[in-house]
Each structure stands twice: as C-alpha cells, then as structure tokens.
C-alpha cells in the first residue's frame, strides 16, 4: 500500500490514530491507551502484515514533560513502512509492551528502559542492557547529570 | 627475548668492559623490537576503520615498517593501538587487554577520542577523556580520524622511541625521542610555502570554466581531453 492508502486504512482500523504531518513516510500518533490494540491489529491483520519492528526508540521532550515513543514498522509482505508514535508523561512513563507481537521488542524495550527509564508493562525481563547493572539514573534524559560528566564551558 | 632481557645483564656484567657490550646489545635488541611490532587487533569505533586502512590495506601496507602481523590475541601482540572512543564500560576490558600483553608493550593512541575524549569530551556520561587515564600511552596521533600517513608518522615515532629509549638494564623506562629536527638544508618557510602552493592548486575550482566545458562537451558530444576518456560517449 502507498502511504495515503495506508493512513486511510489505519484510520479506519483505529479512529484515535492521528496521521502526523510533515513526515517522510506514513506516520501516526496514538494515545497510549490504544497502542496495544493498534499494534496487534497492525501485526496480525493481513492487509497490514507488519511483521518487522525495525526500531524502537524514544525522544525526551522535557519542556512538554513527555517521552515520545517511536516504533518503526515494516512489512516484508507488502513492502510498506509505518511509524507509530505515542506519548507518555515523564513523571510516570508506563507503556504496554509490544513484545508479544515482535520478539525483538524485548531487547529494544530494554534499551529504551536503560537510556530513558521508560517502564514497559508486561515486559518479562526489564533489566539494563548496555550500562552496568548498578548504574544510577537514565543518561539519555535531558536532565541527566552525574559526577563523571564534564559540563561544557560557555 | 625473556632470557636475553632478564639473564643477559647479570651474565655480562662481571666481564670487564661489559657495559660497552651491553650498550651494543641494547641497540640490537631495540632495533629488532622496533622493526617487528605486532599490533593487537583492537578497535572501538570510527578510527578503527582508518587503522584497518593503514595496517590491512595494500595501498598503505604497514609491512613496509615491519608491523604487519596484527594479532587477535593480546598475548601475541606488543603494540596496542587504541583506535577509537573508550567508554566507561570498555575501560576495564582495555586495561585487561593491556595487562595480558607481554612486556615490553607499547601503546599508541590514535584519534582525538583516544587522546582526550575528542568530540565527546563534554556532556558525555560514558566517554573516557583520554585513554591515558587508564593505561600509559607512548605515542599520540591526533586527527579525527588521523590519516594513514599520520598513523605511519606515529608508528615511525614509536620505532624511534623504542630504538632510542629503552635499555635492557632499565626495562620500562623510556626516553622520548627528539622529533623537532628538520632534515638538513630545508627550512620551515620552504615547507610552509610548498604546502601553501599545494593547497592553493588543489583547492581552487573554477566553477564557470567547468560548467562551460561541460556544456561544450554535451554540444559536441565529445570530450575535450586528449589523453583518453573513461566515459563511453563517442
Ligand atoms: S577521533 Fe574521530 S574518527 Fe576517531 S573515534 Fe573519535 S570520533 Fe571517531
């Protein structure tokens, strides 16, 4: 499907999903409550058949007080891409896991947890991935500092 | 090597004039060490690509300087080239690798990251600000990444350091070589002028002329160049 058709189909499947403007590829934003249902549909519905989660990452919009979670999906059946984003508040970043739909999400979510401290509801093994287990804090948060870090002089 | 460095001095010292013989032994040992450096295959980021260019590729070819046997095991290597960013997670492993290498071992830090943390010096939660915070470094090669030529300059400097520096009597004590001397009969101004000329001739492109030439070519359907052409147009 091309992007316009894909967006229409996603909108039909999940009325709460808003298409994002100014995106190179088809992109939708969903409230966090609808994420799981939409992801399940995208994975299992044969018109979408998104069988690959290329990447999952997060953006820290510290001024707006949210983390934006980004899922890049690809379908090897139809060859189309879709970016799904959702926002969670910084103070309680809890989001349902998508591991049951894509096994690789287990590691990608661990990475996001490691760097941003986003908590995945239902994740079987939410431990740090890259940093040492006793690391304090989440270094890719914009307000992260520690004793080791050197501030850039103005 | 172990027998020579550890046993030889005490065998020779009682002999009258032994120190003279030792001095020449030093020279021979240092000469052979300098010309048979075995680098460890160790690279952590982009600089490693440049190191592979310098050591592995036939175009640059380190075997010209007697350092081509890159070893994947630290126990068989005596030159550790720190090529790339060292992060806090890597630091203990780097130290282990260094400690596993047999004496005498030499360390070259290539690239700004290995020297000072480079582009990641400030506001980084992970990057070690210079590999010399973890292990002693003999030679620093600046650049981001250093060119293969710079890498070789570093290697030759290290060879000079080895040749001049260590004595079997005082292992581990190294003297830094003198590097600032210019070849006889050449002044700094001459080098500067030559560099400036090269830069100027390389860096000037006359866009208008080039455009005109292209236009003419497309009209004629033929290249101007007399000395053969790589394109298939006839
Ligand atoms: S010095 Fe530059 S090229 Fe080398 S590892 Fe650092 S960033 Fe990469």
Image (tube, coloured by chain):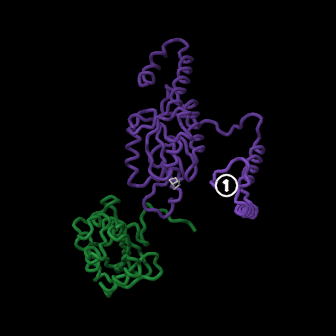
Chain colours: A green, B purple
Q: Position of residue A57 (x, y in %)?
A: 37, 70
Considering every residue shown, the one lying at the far top of the view is: B16
- Residue pointed to by mark 1: B234
A117 sits to left or right of B55: left
Residue sitting nearer the eye, B160 or A51 = A51
Residue sitting nearer the eye, A74 or B102 = A74
Looking at the image, residue B82 lies above or below residue B206:
above
Residue sitting nearer the eye, B15 or A110 = A110
Determine the residue positioned at 41% across, 74% down: A60
Q: Position of residue A28 (x, y in %)?
A: 38, 80
Q: Position of residue B127 (x, y in %)?
A: 45, 57
B138 sits to left or right of A115: right
Looking at the image, residue B116 lies above or below residue B103:
below
Residue A25, by quadrant, is: bottom left
**On-image quarter of the N terminus of chain B:** top left
Task: Say what secondary structure mark 1 lies in.
Answer: loop
């Amino acid at each position: 499907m091309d992007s316009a058709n894909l967006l229409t189909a996603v909108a039909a499947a999940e009325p709460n999903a808003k298409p994002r403007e100014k995106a190179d590829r088809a992109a939708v934003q969903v409230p966090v409550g609808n994420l799981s249902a939409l992801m399940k549909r995208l994975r299992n519905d044969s018109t979408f058949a998104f069988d690959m989660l290329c990447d999952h990452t997060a953006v820290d919009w510290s001024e707006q007080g949210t983390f934006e979670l980004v899922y890049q999906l690809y379908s090897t059946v139809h060859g189309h891409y879709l970016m799904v984003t959702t926002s969670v508040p910084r103070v309680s970043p809890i989001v349902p896991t998508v591991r049951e739909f894509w096994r690789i999400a287990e590691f990608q979510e661990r990475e996001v947890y490691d760097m941003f401290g986003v908590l995945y509801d239902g994740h079987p093994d939410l431990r740090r991935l890259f940093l040492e287990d006793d690391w304090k804090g989440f270094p890719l948060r914009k307000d992260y500092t520690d004793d080791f870090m050197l501030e850039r002089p103005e | 090597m172990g027998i020579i460095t550890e046993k030889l001095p005490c065998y020779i010292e009682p002999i009258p004039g032994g120190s003279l013989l030792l001095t020449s032994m030093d020279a021979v040992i240092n000469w052979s060490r300098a010309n048979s450096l075995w680098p460890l295959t160790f690279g952590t980021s982009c600089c490693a690509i440049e190191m592979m260019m310098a050591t592995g590729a036939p175009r640059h070819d380190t075997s010209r300087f007697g350092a081509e046997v890159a070893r994947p095991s630290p126990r068989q290597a005596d030159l550790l080239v720190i090529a790339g960013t060292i992060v806090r997670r890597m630091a203990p492993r780097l130290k282990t690798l260094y400690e596993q290498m047999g004496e005498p071992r030499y360390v070259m830090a290539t690239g700004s990251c290995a020297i000072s943390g480079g582009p990641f010096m400030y506001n980084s939660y992970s990057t070690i600000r210079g590999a010399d915070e973890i292990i002693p470094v003999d030679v620093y090669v600046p650049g981001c990444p250093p060119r293969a030529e710079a890498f070789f300059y570093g290697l030759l400097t290290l060879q000079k350091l080895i040749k001049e520096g260590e004595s079997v009597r005082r292992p581990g004590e190294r003297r830094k070589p003198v590097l600032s001397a210019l070849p006889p009969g050449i002044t700094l101004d001459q080098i500067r002028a030559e560099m400036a000329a090269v830069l100027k001739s390389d860096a000037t492109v006359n866009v208008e002329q080039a455009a005109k030439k292209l236009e003419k070519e497309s009209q004629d359907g033929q290249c101007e160049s007399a000395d053969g052409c790589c394109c298939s147009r006839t």
